[in-house]
Protein backbone atom coordinates (compact mmCIF):
# COMPACT_ATOMS: atom_id res chain seq x y z
CA UNK A 1 0.00 0.00 0.00
CA UNK A 2 2.75 2.37 0.93
CA UNK A 3 4.18 1.96 -2.54
CA UNK A 4 0.94 2.99 -4.26
CA UNK A 5 0.60 6.05 -2.07
CA UNK A 6 4.09 7.12 -2.99
CA UNK A 7 3.43 6.84 -6.67
CA UNK A 8 0.12 8.67 -6.33
CA UNK A 9 1.64 11.68 -4.63
CA UNK A 10 0.75 14.68 -6.74
CA UNK A 11 3.10 17.57 -7.24
CA UNK A 12 1.07 20.51 -5.94
CA UNK A 13 3.09 23.48 -4.93
CA UNK A 14 1.32 25.31 -2.17
CA UNK A 15 2.78 28.69 -1.53
CA UNK A 16 2.31 29.88 1.99
CA UNK A 17 0.70 33.29 1.99
CA UNK A 18 2.90 34.32 4.89
CA UNK A 19 6.11 33.39 3.06
CA UNK A 20 8.83 36.02 3.17
CA UNK A 21 11.17 34.47 0.63
CA UNK A 22 11.01 37.59 -1.55
CA UNK A 23 12.14 39.60 1.47
CA UNK A 24 15.01 37.18 2.04
CA UNK A 25 16.09 37.51 -1.59
CA UNK A 26 15.76 41.32 -1.42
CA UNK A 27 17.90 41.70 1.69
CA UNK A 28 20.53 39.42 0.15
CA UNK A 29 20.60 41.56 -2.99
CA UNK A 30 20.91 44.65 -0.80
CA UNK A 31 23.76 43.04 1.13
CA UNK A 32 25.59 42.11 -2.09
CA UNK A 33 25.24 45.67 -3.32
CA UNK A 34 26.79 47.00 -0.10
CA UNK A 35 29.66 44.53 -0.36
CA UNK A 36 30.33 45.25 -4.06
CA UNK A 37 30.42 49.01 -3.43
CA UNK A 38 32.71 48.63 -0.45
CA UNK A 39 35.10 46.24 -2.19
CA UNK A 40 35.17 48.54 -5.23
CA UNK A 41 36.35 51.53 -3.23
CA UNK A 42 38.62 49.31 -1.13
CA UNK A 43 40.46 48.21 -4.27
CA UNK A 44 40.87 51.86 -5.26
CA UNK A 45 42.25 52.51 -1.79
CA UNK A 46 44.71 49.62 -2.07
CA UNK A 47 45.86 50.73 -5.51
CA UNK A 48 46.40 54.34 -4.42
CA UNK A 49 47.77 54.28 -0.89
CA UNK B 1 -3.85 48.57 18.30
CA UNK B 2 -6.57 51.13 18.93
CA UNK B 3 -5.76 54.13 21.03
CA UNK B 4 -8.71 56.06 22.39
CA UNK B 5 -6.54 59.19 22.30
CA UNK B 6 -6.08 58.93 18.53
CA UNK B 7 -7.99 61.60 16.64
CA UNK B 8 -9.57 61.15 13.25
CA UNK B 9 -8.34 64.56 12.34
CA UNK B 10 -5.56 66.77 13.70
CA UNK B 11 -7.17 69.60 15.67
CA UNK B 12 -7.41 72.81 13.63
CA UNK B 13 -5.34 74.79 16.14
CA UNK B 14 -2.54 72.20 16.10
CA UNK B 15 -2.84 72.10 12.34
CA UNK B 16 -2.21 75.83 12.15
CA UNK B 17 0.94 75.43 14.24
CA UNK B 18 2.21 72.65 11.98
CA UNK B 19 1.34 74.61 8.83
CA UNK B 20 3.27 77.64 10.12
CA UNK B 21 6.34 75.38 10.18
CA UNK B 22 5.65 74.16 6.65
CA UNK B 23 5.38 77.68 5.22
CA UNK B 24 8.87 78.48 6.48
CA UNK B 25 10.16 75.10 5.27
CA UNK B 26 8.89 75.53 1.70
CA UNK B 27 10.08 79.16 1.54
CA UNK B 28 13.48 77.75 2.48
CA UNK B 29 13.16 75.20 -0.33
CA UNK B 30 12.66 78.02 -2.86
CA UNK B 31 15.61 80.12 -1.66
CA UNK B 32 18.00 77.25 -0.98
CA UNK B 33 17.10 75.52 -4.22
CA UNK B 34 17.91 78.64 -6.24
CA UNK B 35 21.25 78.94 -4.46
CA UNK B 36 21.98 75.30 -5.27
CA UNK B 37 21.20 75.84 -8.95
CA UNK B 38 23.57 78.83 -9.06
CA UNK B 39 26.32 76.78 -7.41
CA UNK B 40 26.18 74.03 -10.00
CA UNK B 41 26.13 76.62 -12.81
CA UNK B 42 29.22 78.37 -11.42
CA UNK B 43 31.04 75.09 -11.00
CA UNK B 44 30.40 74.19 -14.63
CA UNK B 45 32.75 77.05 -15.54
CA UNK B 46 30.22 78.46 -18.03
CA UNK B 47 28.63 81.03 -15.75
CA UNK B 48 29.69 83.75 -13.34
CA UNK B 49 27.64 85.26 -10.55
CA UNK B 50 26.49 88.84 -11.20
CA UNK B 51 26.96 91.89 -8.98
CA UNK B 52 29.98 90.55 -7.17
CA UNK B 53 28.02 87.89 -5.30
CA UNK B 54 30.47 85.33 -3.99
CA UNK B 55 30.27 81.60 -4.67
CA UNK B 56 30.89 80.83 -1.02
CA UNK B 57 28.10 83.15 0.01
CA UNK B 58 25.52 81.20 -2.01
CA UNK B 59 27.07 77.96 -0.81
CA UNK B 60 26.42 79.12 2.75
CA UNK B 61 22.85 80.09 1.84
CA UNK B 62 22.25 76.68 0.25
CA UNK B 63 23.64 74.72 3.19
CA UNK B 64 22.08 76.70 6.01
CA UNK B 65 18.69 77.21 4.39
CA UNK B 66 18.20 73.64 3.21
CA UNK B 67 20.31 71.64 5.69
CA UNK B 68 19.19 73.48 8.81
CA UNK B 69 16.04 75.49 8.08
CA UNK B 70 13.99 73.36 5.65
CA UNK B 71 14.70 70.16 7.55
CA UNK B 72 14.23 71.43 11.11
CA UNK B 73 11.01 73.30 10.34
CA UNK B 74 9.49 70.46 8.33
CA UNK B 75 10.42 67.88 10.96
CA UNK B 76 9.07 69.92 13.87
CA UNK B 77 5.81 70.55 11.99
CA UNK B 78 5.43 66.88 11.04
CA UNK B 79 6.20 65.63 14.55
CA UNK B 80 3.74 68.05 16.13
CA UNK B 81 1.01 66.94 13.70
CA UNK B 82 1.85 63.25 14.26
CA UNK B 83 1.82 63.61 18.05
CA UNK B 84 -1.43 65.56 18.03
CA UNK B 85 -3.04 62.96 15.75
CA UNK B 86 -1.96 59.90 17.75
CA UNK B 87 -1.88 61.17 21.36
CA UNK B 88 -4.63 63.74 21.18
CA UNK B 89 -4.93 67.49 20.77
CA UNK B 90 -2.21 69.54 22.43
CA UNK B 91 -3.22 71.41 25.57
CA UNK B 92 -3.08 75.21 25.38
CA UNK B 93 0.18 75.18 27.32
CA UNK B 94 1.75 72.63 24.98
CA UNK B 95 0.61 74.55 21.93
CA UNK B 96 1.94 77.78 23.38
CA UNK B 97 5.35 76.12 23.79
CA UNK B 98 5.10 75.09 20.14
CA UNK B 99 4.37 78.67 19.03
CA UNK B 100 7.13 80.19 21.18
CA UNK B 101 9.55 77.66 19.73
CA UNK B 102 8.35 78.38 16.21
CA UNK B 103 8.74 82.16 16.54
CA UNK B 104 12.17 81.88 18.17
CA UNK B 105 13.32 79.59 15.36
CA UNK B 106 11.88 81.93 12.75
CA UNK B 107 13.45 85.03 14.32
CA UNK B 108 16.80 83.24 14.50
CA UNK B 109 16.51 82.15 10.88
CA UNK B 110 15.75 85.68 9.69
CA UNK B 111 18.68 87.08 11.69
CA UNK B 112 21.11 84.48 10.36
CA UNK B 113 19.78 84.93 6.81
CA UNK B 114 20.26 88.70 6.96
CA UNK B 115 23.86 88.27 8.06
CA UNK B 116 24.53 85.80 5.25
CA UNK B 117 22.91 88.11 2.68
CA UNK B 118 24.99 91.04 3.97
CA UNK B 119 28.02 88.83 3.30
CA UNK B 120 28.97 88.93 6.98
CA UNK B 121 28.71 85.19 7.54
CA UNK B 122 30.16 83.33 4.58
CA UNK B 123 31.43 80.51 6.77
CA UNK B 124 29.69 77.58 5.03
CA UNK B 125 26.96 75.68 6.75
CA UNK B 126 29.39 73.86 9.01
CA UNK B 127 30.64 77.31 10.16
CA UNK B 128 34.13 76.04 10.43
CA UNK B 129 36.42 78.09 12.63
CA UNK B 130 38.81 79.82 12.01
CA UNK B 131 36.40 81.26 9.46
CA UNK B 132 34.73 83.92 11.56
CA UNK B 133 31.21 85.23 11.03
CA UNK B 134 29.49 88.28 12.51
CA UNK B 135 28.30 87.65 16.08
CA UNK B 136 24.66 88.18 15.04
CA UNK B 137 24.89 85.13 12.76
CA UNK B 138 25.88 82.93 15.70
CA UNK B 139 23.14 84.50 17.83
CA UNK B 140 20.61 83.78 15.08
CA UNK B 141 21.59 80.13 14.91
CA UNK B 142 21.48 79.89 18.70
CA UNK B 143 17.89 81.14 18.60
CA UNK B 144 17.06 78.46 16.01
CA UNK B 145 18.39 75.77 18.33
CA UNK B 146 16.85 77.11 21.53
CA UNK B 147 13.57 77.54 19.64
CA UNK B 148 13.72 73.92 18.51
CA UNK B 149 14.15 72.81 22.14
CA UNK B 150 11.04 74.71 23.21
CA UNK B 151 9.17 73.40 20.17
CA UNK B 152 10.31 69.88 21.12
CA UNK B 153 9.14 70.45 24.69
CA UNK B 154 5.56 70.44 23.36
CA UNK B 155 6.08 66.86 22.18
CA UNK B 156 7.76 65.77 25.42
CA UNK B 157 4.92 67.29 27.50
CA UNK B 158 2.28 65.58 25.37
CA UNK B 159 4.05 62.24 25.71
CA UNK B 160 4.34 62.61 29.49
CA UNK B 161 0.64 63.50 29.70
CA UNK B 162 -0.32 60.44 27.61
CA UNK B 163 1.73 58.11 29.78
CA UNK B 164 0.14 59.56 32.95
CA UNK B 165 -3.32 58.96 31.56
CA UNK B 166 -2.55 55.48 30.21
CA UNK B 167 -0.44 53.71 32.85
CA UNK B 168 1.17 50.44 31.75
CA UNK B 169 0.40 51.07 28.07
CA UNK B 170 2.98 51.51 25.31
CA UNK B 171 2.64 54.96 23.78
CA UNK B 172 1.27 55.37 20.24
CA UNK B 173 4.03 54.48 17.80
CA UNK B 174 4.21 57.85 15.98
CA UNK B 175 4.35 59.70 19.31
CA UNK B 176 7.07 57.34 20.54
CA UNK B 177 9.11 57.94 17.39
CA UNK B 178 8.66 61.73 17.54
CA UNK B 179 9.80 61.61 21.15
CA UNK B 180 12.94 59.58 20.38
CA UNK B 181 13.88 61.98 17.60
CA UNK B 182 13.26 65.00 19.82
CA UNK B 183 15.41 63.59 22.61
CA UNK B 184 18.19 62.69 20.20
CA UNK B 185 18.05 66.24 18.84
CA UNK B 186 18.28 67.79 22.30
CA UNK B 187 21.25 65.63 23.35
CA UNK B 188 23.01 66.29 20.03
CA UNK B 189 22.46 70.05 19.87
CA UNK B 190 24.18 70.48 23.23
CA UNK B 191 27.43 70.06 21.25
CA UNK B 192 26.81 72.76 18.68
CA UNK B 193 25.28 75.05 21.31
CA UNK B 194 28.46 74.65 23.40
CA UNK B 195 30.84 75.55 20.60
CA UNK B 196 28.70 78.52 19.55
CA UNK B 197 28.06 79.92 23.04
CA UNK B 198 31.41 79.21 24.70
CA UNK B 199 33.82 79.46 21.77
CA UNK B 200 32.58 81.15 18.59
CA UNK B 201 30.36 83.88 20.04
CA UNK B 202 32.89 85.27 22.58
CA UNK B 203 35.53 85.04 19.85
CA UNK B 204 33.48 86.89 17.23
CA UNK B 205 32.59 89.55 19.82
CA UNK B 206 36.30 90.05 20.46
CA UNK B 207 36.06 88.94 24.10
CA UNK B 208 38.69 86.28 23.44
CA UNK B 209 41.29 86.51 20.73
CA UNK B 210 41.73 82.91 19.69
CA UNK B 211 39.73 79.73 19.48
CA UNK B 212 40.68 76.04 19.82
CA UNK B 213 39.87 74.75 16.34
CA UNK B 214 40.00 71.02 17.07
CA UNK B 215 37.64 71.35 20.03
CA UNK B 216 35.25 73.46 17.98
CA UNK B 217 35.21 70.97 15.12
CA UNK B 218 34.77 68.04 17.50
CA UNK B 219 31.81 69.73 19.20
CA UNK B 220 30.35 70.51 15.80
CA UNK B 221 30.58 66.90 14.60
CA UNK B 222 29.29 65.59 17.92
CA UNK B 223 26.17 67.37 16.68
CA UNK B 224 26.73 66.98 12.94
CA UNK B 225 26.23 63.26 12.69
CA UNK B 226 23.11 62.85 14.83
CA UNK B 227 21.85 65.80 12.78
CA UNK B 228 21.67 63.52 9.74
CA UNK B 229 19.70 60.97 11.76
CA UNK B 230 17.43 63.76 12.96
CA UNK B 231 16.63 64.26 9.26
CA UNK B 232 16.29 60.57 8.58
CA UNK B 233 14.12 59.40 11.50
CA UNK B 234 11.01 61.35 10.45
CA UNK B 235 11.37 59.69 7.04
CA UNK B 236 11.55 56.35 8.85
CA UNK B 237 8.39 57.33 10.77
CA UNK B 238 6.63 57.66 7.44
CA UNK B 239 8.14 54.43 6.12
CA UNK B 240 7.34 52.33 9.19
CA UNK B 241 3.93 53.70 10.11
CA UNK B 242 2.35 55.72 7.29
CA UNK B 243 3.29 53.70 4.19
CA UNK B 244 1.75 50.40 5.45
CA UNK B 245 -1.59 52.19 5.83
CA UNK B 246 -1.30 53.92 2.45
CA UNK B 247 -0.82 50.59 0.65
CA UNK B 248 -3.55 48.93 2.73
CA UNK B 249 -1.24 46.60 4.65
CA UNK B 250 -0.13 46.26 8.26
CA UNK B 251 2.95 47.37 10.17
CA UNK B 252 5.30 44.38 10.02
CA UNK B 253 6.34 44.76 13.66
CA UNK B 254 5.61 47.57 16.07
CA UNK B 255 8.30 46.31 18.48
CA UNK B 256 10.97 46.08 15.79
CA UNK B 257 10.26 49.67 14.79
CA UNK B 258 10.62 50.82 18.41
CA UNK B 259 13.83 48.84 18.86
CA UNK B 260 15.37 50.35 15.75
CA UNK B 261 14.54 53.88 16.96
CA UNK B 262 16.10 53.14 20.35
CA UNK B 263 19.24 51.87 18.61
CA UNK B 264 19.40 55.13 16.66
CA UNK B 265 19.18 57.07 19.90
CA UNK B 266 22.05 55.05 21.38
CA UNK B 267 24.42 54.85 18.44
CA UNK B 268 23.96 57.95 16.32
CA UNK B 269 25.65 60.38 18.72
CA UNK B 270 29.01 58.93 19.81
CA UNK B 271 30.18 58.67 16.19
CA UNK B 272 31.21 62.22 15.17
CA UNK B 273 34.85 61.24 14.70
CA UNK B 274 34.00 59.49 11.46
CA UNK B 275 33.72 63.02 10.03
CA UNK B 276 37.19 63.78 11.38
CA UNK B 277 39.06 60.65 10.36
CA UNK B 278 41.71 62.67 8.51
CA UNK B 279 42.23 65.18 11.32
CA UNK B 280 45.32 65.36 13.48
CA UNK B 281 45.03 65.66 17.24
CA UNK B 282 42.70 62.70 17.77
CA UNK B 283 44.21 59.35 18.66
CA UNK B 284 43.50 56.72 15.95
CA UNK B 285 42.35 54.28 18.64
CA UNK B 286 39.46 56.62 19.56
CA UNK B 287 38.66 57.14 15.90
CA UNK B 288 38.54 53.36 15.53
CA UNK B 289 36.17 53.04 18.49
CA UNK B 290 33.80 55.56 16.91
CA UNK B 291 34.09 53.76 13.57
CA UNK B 292 32.84 50.61 15.32
CA UNK B 293 29.96 52.55 16.89
CA UNK B 294 29.19 53.99 13.44
CA UNK B 295 28.92 50.50 12.01
CA UNK B 296 26.48 49.64 14.81
CA UNK B 297 24.13 52.29 13.38
CA UNK B 298 24.04 50.23 10.20
CA UNK B 299 22.06 47.60 12.12
CA UNK B 300 18.84 49.58 12.67
CA UNK B 301 18.97 50.74 9.04
CA UNK B 302 19.21 47.15 7.84
CA UNK B 303 16.38 46.22 10.25
CA UNK B 304 14.35 48.96 8.60
CA UNK B 305 15.12 47.64 5.12
CA UNK B 306 14.07 44.12 6.15
CA UNK B 307 10.92 45.37 7.82
CA UNK B 308 9.86 47.39 4.77
CA UNK B 309 10.47 44.55 2.32
CA UNK B 310 8.46 42.31 4.66
CA UNK B 311 5.59 44.82 4.87
CA UNK B 312 5.42 45.01 1.09
CA UNK B 313 5.70 41.26 0.56
CA UNK B 314 3.09 40.42 3.24
CA UNK B 315 0.71 42.90 1.65
CA UNK B 316 1.32 41.58 -1.86
CA UNK B 317 0.82 37.96 -0.79
CA UNK B 318 -2.40 38.85 1.04
CA UNK B 319 -3.60 40.10 -2.35
CA UNK B 320 -2.73 36.78 -3.97
CA UNK B 321 0.77 37.54 -5.24
CA UNK B 322 2.88 34.49 -6.10
CA UNK B 323 6.51 33.78 -6.89
CA UNK B 324 9.62 35.42 -5.53
CA UNK B 325 8.80 39.00 -6.54
CA UNK B 326 5.14 38.83 -7.57
CA UNK B 327 4.24 41.14 -4.66
CA UNK B 328 6.02 44.06 -6.32
CA UNK B 329 3.22 44.24 -8.90
CA UNK B 330 0.54 44.51 -6.20
CA UNK B 331 1.88 47.76 -4.77
CA UNK B 332 -0.12 50.93 -5.54
CA UNK B 333 2.29 52.55 -8.00
CA UNK B 334 -0.23 55.18 -9.07
CA UNK B 335 -0.44 56.66 -5.56
CA UNK B 336 2.04 59.50 -4.99
CA UNK B 337 1.72 59.03 -1.22
CA UNK B 338 3.37 55.63 -1.71
CA UNK B 339 5.49 55.96 -4.85
CA UNK B 340 7.33 59.17 -3.93
CA UNK B 341 8.56 57.92 -0.52
CA UNK B 342 9.27 54.52 -2.12
CA UNK B 343 11.70 56.18 -4.51
CA UNK B 344 13.26 57.73 -1.41
CA UNK B 345 13.67 54.26 0.11
CA UNK B 346 15.37 52.94 -3.02
CA UNK B 347 17.73 55.92 -3.06
CA UNK B 348 18.77 55.02 0.46
CA UNK B 349 20.43 51.83 -0.82
CA UNK B 350 23.27 53.57 -2.75
CA UNK B 351 23.20 56.34 -0.13
CA UNK B 352 23.81 53.86 2.68
CA UNK B 353 26.45 51.99 0.70
CA UNK B 354 28.35 55.25 0.18
CA UNK B 355 28.01 56.05 3.87
CA UNK B 356 29.63 52.75 4.84
CA UNK B 357 32.56 53.62 2.56
CA UNK B 358 32.89 57.10 4.10
CA UNK B 359 32.99 55.70 7.64
CA UNK B 360 35.55 52.96 6.92
CA UNK B 361 38.44 54.63 8.76
CA UNK B 362 41.53 54.56 6.48
CA UNK B 363 39.37 54.14 3.38
CA UNK B 364 38.01 57.60 4.10
CA UNK B 365 41.26 58.85 2.52
CA UNK B 366 39.88 57.95 -0.91
CA UNK B 367 36.86 60.22 -0.56
CA UNK B 368 37.65 62.72 2.21
CA UNK B 369 36.79 66.30 1.26
CA UNK B 370 36.04 65.24 -2.29
CA UNK B 371 32.74 65.95 -3.99
CA UNK B 372 31.88 62.26 -3.53
CA UNK B 373 30.74 63.27 -0.03
CA UNK B 374 28.49 65.98 -1.47
CA UNK B 375 27.05 63.37 -3.84
CA UNK B 376 26.52 61.07 -0.84
CA UNK B 377 24.45 63.48 1.21
CA UNK B 378 22.47 64.56 -1.81
CA UNK B 379 21.28 60.96 -1.96
CA UNK B 380 20.59 60.66 1.77
CA UNK B 381 19.05 63.96 2.77
CA UNK B 382 18.30 65.49 -0.62
CA UNK B 383 16.67 62.38 -2.08
CA UNK B 384 15.65 59.77 0.53
CA UNK B 385 14.60 62.27 3.17
CA UNK B 386 13.31 65.07 0.97
CA UNK B 387 11.27 62.85 -1.35
CA UNK B 388 9.72 61.23 1.73
CA UNK B 389 8.90 64.69 3.10
CA UNK B 390 7.31 65.58 -0.26
CA UNK B 391 5.34 62.32 -0.15
CA UNK B 392 4.17 63.19 3.38
CA UNK B 393 3.19 66.70 2.25
CA UNK B 394 0.83 65.27 -0.37
CA UNK B 395 -1.56 64.05 2.34
CA UNK B 396 -0.53 66.09 5.38
CA UNK B 397 -0.87 69.57 3.86
CA UNK B 398 -4.43 68.97 2.57
CA UNK B 399 -5.30 67.15 5.82
CA UNK B 400 -4.31 70.23 7.81
CA UNK B 401 -5.88 72.77 5.46
CA UNK B 402 -9.16 70.86 5.02
CA UNK B 403 -8.55 70.14 1.34
CA UNK B 404 -7.91 67.05 -0.78
CA UNK B 405 -5.16 65.74 -2.99
CA UNK B 406 -6.74 65.72 -6.44
CA UNK B 407 -5.92 63.17 -9.15
CA UNK B 408 -4.11 65.86 -11.12
CA UNK B 409 -1.91 66.83 -8.14
CA UNK B 410 -1.28 63.16 -7.37
CA UNK B 411 -0.01 62.66 -10.92
CA UNK B 412 2.07 65.83 -10.73
CA UNK B 413 3.58 64.52 -7.49
CA UNK B 414 4.76 61.37 -9.26
CA UNK B 415 6.11 63.40 -12.20
CA UNK B 416 7.93 65.61 -9.68
CA UNK B 417 9.62 62.57 -8.16
CA UNK B 418 10.64 61.24 -11.58
CA UNK B 419 12.18 64.62 -12.46
CA UNK B 420 13.98 64.54 -9.13
CA UNK B 421 15.40 61.09 -9.82
CA UNK B 422 16.63 62.10 -13.28
CA UNK B 423 18.21 65.30 -11.98
CA UNK B 424 19.78 63.61 -9.01
CA UNK B 425 21.13 60.71 -11.07
CA UNK B 426 23.02 63.24 -13.19
CA UNK B 427 24.10 65.42 -10.29
CA UNK B 428 24.84 62.96 -7.52
CA UNK B 429 26.16 60.33 -9.93
CA UNK B 430 28.70 62.72 -11.45
CA UNK B 431 29.61 64.01 -7.99
CA UNK B 432 30.41 60.47 -6.85
CA UNK B 433 32.45 59.80 -9.99
CA UNK B 434 34.37 63.08 -9.91
CA UNK B 435 35.02 62.58 -6.19
CA UNK B 436 36.70 59.24 -6.87
CA UNK B 437 38.90 61.12 -9.35
CA UNK B 438 39.87 63.53 -6.58
CA UNK B 439 37.64 66.55 -7.31
CA UNK B 440 37.34 68.64 -4.14
CA UNK B 441 34.03 69.55 -2.54
CA UNK B 442 33.05 73.08 -1.46
CA UNK B 443 35.49 74.92 -3.76
CA UNK B 444 34.43 77.18 -6.61
CA UNK B 445 35.30 76.64 -10.26
CA UNK B 446 39.01 76.52 -10.95
CA UNK B 447 41.23 75.00 -13.60
CA UNK B 448 44.02 74.70 -11.03
CA UNK B 449 46.57 76.21 -13.40
CA UNK B 450 45.62 73.81 -16.17
CA UNK B 451 46.59 70.69 -14.20
CA UNK B 452 45.72 67.54 -16.16
CA UNK B 453 43.92 65.94 -13.22
CA UNK B 454 41.68 68.99 -12.73
CA UNK B 455 40.72 68.99 -16.42
CA UNK B 456 39.30 65.49 -15.96
CA UNK B 457 36.73 66.85 -13.52
CA UNK B 458 35.21 69.48 -15.79
CA UNK B 459 32.86 67.23 -17.83
CA UNK B 460 31.48 65.91 -14.52
CA UNK B 461 30.93 69.48 -13.36
CA UNK B 462 28.96 70.20 -16.52
CA UNK B 463 26.87 67.09 -15.78
CA UNK B 464 26.28 68.42 -12.26
CA UNK B 465 24.96 71.69 -13.73
CA UNK B 466 22.60 69.74 -16.01
CA UNK B 467 21.41 67.71 -13.02
CA UNK B 468 21.12 70.83 -10.86
CA UNK B 469 18.98 72.54 -13.52
CA UNK B 470 16.64 69.54 -13.77
CA UNK B 471 16.38 69.46 -9.96
CA UNK B 472 15.49 73.12 -9.92
CA UNK B 473 12.57 72.37 -12.25
CA UNK B 474 11.56 69.72 -9.71
CA UNK B 475 11.65 72.34 -6.95
CA UNK B 476 9.42 74.72 -8.94
CA UNK B 477 6.95 71.89 -9.50
CA UNK B 478 7.00 70.98 -5.79
CA UNK B 479 6.35 74.60 -4.78
CA UNK B 480 3.43 74.70 -7.22
CA UNK B 481 1.96 71.55 -5.65
CA UNK B 482 2.50 72.91 -2.13
CA UNK B 483 0.74 76.19 -2.91
CA UNK B 484 -2.10 74.30 -4.57
CA UNK B 485 -2.57 71.99 -1.57
CA UNK B 486 -2.31 74.85 0.92
CA UNK B 487 -4.63 77.34 -0.80
CA UNK B 488 -6.41 76.12 -3.91
CA UNK B 489 -7.18 72.38 -3.81
CA UNK B 490 -10.89 71.52 -3.43
CA UNK B 491 -12.24 71.45 0.12
CA UNK B 492 -12.67 68.01 1.60
CA UNK B 493 -11.31 65.39 3.96
CA UNK B 494 -7.84 63.98 3.32
CA UNK B 495 -6.90 60.99 5.47
CA UNK B 496 -3.92 61.09 7.88
CA UNK B 497 -2.76 57.48 7.33
CA UNK B 498 -1.59 55.74 10.50
CA UNK B 499 -0.75 52.06 10.10
CA UNK B 500 -1.67 49.35 12.57
CA UNK B 501 0.24 46.22 13.56
CA UNK B 502 -1.05 42.84 12.40
CA UNK B 503 -4.08 41.56 14.39
CA UNK B 504 -2.11 38.82 16.13
CA UNK B 505 0.78 41.15 17.09
CA UNK B 506 1.85 41.19 20.71
CA UNK B 507 1.88 44.36 22.78
CA UNK B 508 5.20 46.22 22.52
CA UNK B 509 7.39 45.54 25.59
CA UNK B 510 7.24 48.36 28.14
CA UNK B 511 11.03 48.38 28.44
CA UNK B 512 11.09 50.59 25.34
CA UNK B 513 9.47 53.36 27.38
CA UNK B 514 12.11 53.24 30.10
CA UNK B 515 13.88 56.54 29.42
CA UNK B 516 16.12 56.36 32.48
CA UNK B 517 17.61 53.24 30.92
CA UNK B 518 17.94 54.47 27.31
CA UNK B 519 19.09 58.01 28.09
CA UNK B 520 21.43 56.50 30.70
CA UNK B 521 23.08 54.23 28.11
CA UNK B 522 23.19 57.13 25.64
CA UNK B 523 25.07 59.30 28.14
CA UNK B 524 27.44 56.47 29.11
CA UNK B 525 28.29 55.79 25.45
CA UNK B 526 28.90 59.48 24.80
CA UNK B 527 31.13 59.84 27.86
CA UNK B 528 33.03 56.71 26.89
CA UNK B 529 33.58 57.82 23.31
CA UNK B 530 34.43 61.46 24.00
CA UNK B 531 35.86 62.07 27.49
CA UNK B 532 39.49 61.06 26.95
CA UNK B 533 39.73 62.53 23.43
CA UNK B 534 38.42 65.86 24.77
CA UNK B 535 40.93 65.87 27.62
CA UNK B 536 43.63 65.20 25.01
CA UNK B 537 42.41 67.94 22.68
CA UNK B 538 42.35 70.51 25.47
CA UNK B 539 45.53 69.54 27.33
CA UNK B 540 47.69 69.16 24.25
CA UNK B 541 46.17 72.00 22.30
CA UNK B 542 48.31 73.96 19.83
CA UNK B 543 48.07 77.76 20.02
CA UNK B 544 44.52 78.92 19.26
CA UNK B 545 43.55 80.51 15.97
CA UNK B 546 42.59 84.11 15.23
CA UNK B 547 39.48 84.68 13.16
CA UNK B 548 39.70 84.87 9.37
CA UNK B 549 37.32 86.48 6.93
CA UNK B 550 38.54 85.19 3.60
CA UNK B 551 35.55 86.27 1.52
Image (cartoon, rainbow, N blue to C red):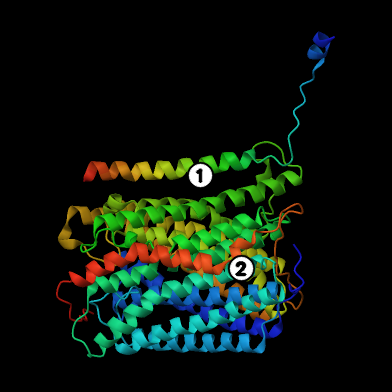
Horizontal and vertical percent position of residue B387: 54, 63
In the image, residue B291 above or below residue B125: above
Q: Helix, strand or loop at disc 2?
A: helix
Task: Classify 10 Å Cα crowding around label 1: few (below 14), some (14-19), many (20 and above).
Answer: some
Q: Which residue is mark 1?
A: A30
- Identify the chain of the residue marked 1, using the numbered disc in the image: A
In the image, residue B424 above or below residue B392: above
| Observer-nearest of B121 and B421 | B121
In the image, residue B83 above or below residue B335: below
Q: Quadrant of residue B407?
A: bottom right
Do tag 2 and tag 1 residues touch (Cβ < 8 Å)?
Answer: no
Q: Which residue is mark 2?
A: B176
In the image, taking residue B215 as reference, residue B225 lies left or right, namely right
In the picture, which quadrant includes the C terminus of chain B?
bottom left
Q: Is residue B433 visible?
A: yes
Horizontal and vertical percent position of residue A6: 79, 13
Amino acid sequence: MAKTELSQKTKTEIEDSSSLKGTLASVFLLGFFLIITWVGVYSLFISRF
Amino acid sequence: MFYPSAKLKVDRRDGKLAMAHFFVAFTALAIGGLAGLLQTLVRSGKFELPAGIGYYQILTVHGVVLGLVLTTFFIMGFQIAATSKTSGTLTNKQRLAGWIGFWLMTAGTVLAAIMILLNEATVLYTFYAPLQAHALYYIGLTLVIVGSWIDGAAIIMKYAEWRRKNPGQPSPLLTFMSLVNTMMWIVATIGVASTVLFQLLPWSLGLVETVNIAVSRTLFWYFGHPLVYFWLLPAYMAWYVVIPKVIGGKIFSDSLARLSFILFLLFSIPVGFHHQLMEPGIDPAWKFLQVILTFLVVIPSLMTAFSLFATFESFGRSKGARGLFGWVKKLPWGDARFTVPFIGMVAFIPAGAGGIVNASHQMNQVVHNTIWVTGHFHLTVATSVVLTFFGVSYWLIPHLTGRTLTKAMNKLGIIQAVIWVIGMTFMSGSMHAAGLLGAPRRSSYSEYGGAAQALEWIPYQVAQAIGGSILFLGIILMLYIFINLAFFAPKGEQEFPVGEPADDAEKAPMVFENWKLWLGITVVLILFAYTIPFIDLIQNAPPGAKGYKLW
